Amino acid sequence: MKHKLKWLAIGLVCLAGAFLLHPLERQWSVRCMLTWGLGIMSCVAFVAFFMEFFGKDKFVKGEMRIEEVIPLKKHGCKVLGKLDGRLIVHEPIVIRDRNGNTLHTKVDGIEVVQTRRSAAVDAPVTLLLKSVSPDAVHPNDVISNENT
């Protein structure tokens, strides 16, 4: 939220500067060009604010078939698989087993497994699931961000 409000602050500062310089300007003087410049900068900043504040990210489906479950000592587990699409940290997800049962949780962390070749769409990924017991997930279960 803070990064969105910076554009509003920049726009307000530029607009205030333009209003303060306006009474001091003469026709086509350096101050006049500065006033016009600040006015234009404030308009650009306001447009950027509205585009960023009211624009929505396009939903991208993400799906991963679990290949391996790694239990953690303290809590939760890590699951390894190949990701198709996009998952985001703290995004709600659904884990579906082979019987159709579902488990709703969120992604607590993502690690792209390093390989010698360049990263591709189907690069191996490890997801951290702190709130999921290692006994609740199995290889071949499907993790998806769709229908959450």
Image (cartoon, helix red, strand yellow):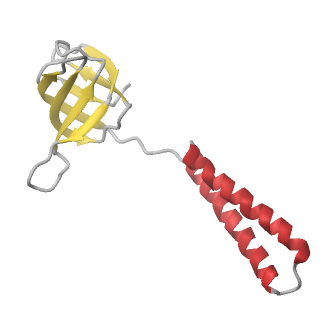
In this rendering, does residue 140 appear at all?
A: no
Outermost residue to the front: 74
- Horizontally, residue 59 falls left or right of residue 101, namely right
The count of marks equals 0
Please state the horizontal and vertical placement of residue 93, each as a whole percent of the image: 33, 26
Q: Residue at x 79, y 61 (%)?
A: 16
Q: Quadrant of residue 65?
A: top left
Of 2 and 94, the residue lying toward us: 2
Above or below for 18 versus 51: below
Please state the horizontal and vertical placement of residue 82, each as a whole percent of the image: 16, 38
- Horizontally, residue 36 falls left or right of residue 73, namely right
Please state the horizontal and vertical placement of residue 66, each as a whole percent of the image: 15, 28
Q: Which residue is drawn at 13% across and 19% down?
A: 138
In this rendering, does residue 119 appear at all?
A: yes
Screen quadrant of the C terminus: top left
Q: In which quarter of the image is residue 108?
A: top left
Outermost residue to the left: 116
Outermost residue to the bottom: 28
Please state the horizontal and vertical placement of residue 53, each as a whole percent of the image: 59, 47
Q: Residue at x 60, y 58 (%)?
A: 48
- Horizontally, residue 43 falls left or right of residue 30, namely left
Screen quadrant of the N terminus: top right
Above or below for 109 versus 50: above
- Horizontally, residue 109 falls left or right of residue 73, namely right
